[in-house]
Image (cartoon, helix red, strand yellow):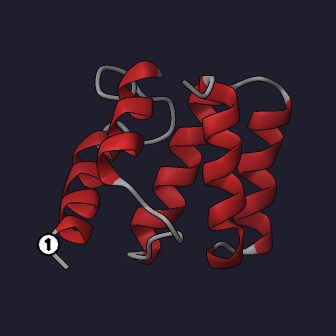
Amino acid sequence: MVPSDKRLEMYIISSKELLSIEGIKEVEHYFNHSEYEMAFEGLLIELTKLGMYPKGFNFLEWKALGERFNLDKESVFDESIWGKFLIWGKAYSIQ
């Protein structure tokens, strides 16, 4: 099993081409300071706003990582991000 921080790093890398320079810098800032929950939440905020999906997106894997980071229970930036993520992720699953 891939450690949470390495999985998050893979998700950030796969999302880079979709995000603005400022968006990716913000996500990387939290990641580089080992604030993985905040980095993942920031990544979800950016992607759900865009309505785009990174290459190789797997909703169930992303959901499991979000749950590991407790984003389903607590968030820092957007209290409704988990609900937005679920709608966004499930929309990909039916494409």
Identify whether 66 is placed above or below 27. above
Who's the residue at 80% across and 71% down the image?
A: 21
Residue 56, percent from left and from top: 49, 65
**Quadrant occupied by the N terminus:** top right
> Where, by quadrant of the figure, is residue 62 drawn?
top left
Label 1's element?
Answer: loop
Count the labels in the image. Answer: 1
- Is 9 placed left or right of 15 in the picture? right
Pointer 1: what residue? 94
Identify whether 46 is placed above or below 62. below
Identify whether 4 is placed above or below 9. above
* In front of the other: 60 or 88: 60
Residue 49, percent from left and from top: 43, 69
Circle 1 residues within 10 Å: few <14, some 14–19, many ≥20 = few
Who's the residue at 62% across and 39% down the image?
A: 8
Under mark 1, the amino acid is Ile
From this viewpoint, which residue is outermost toward the left? 94
Residue 38, percent from left and from top: 60, 33
Who's the residue at 50% across and 39% down the image?
A: 77
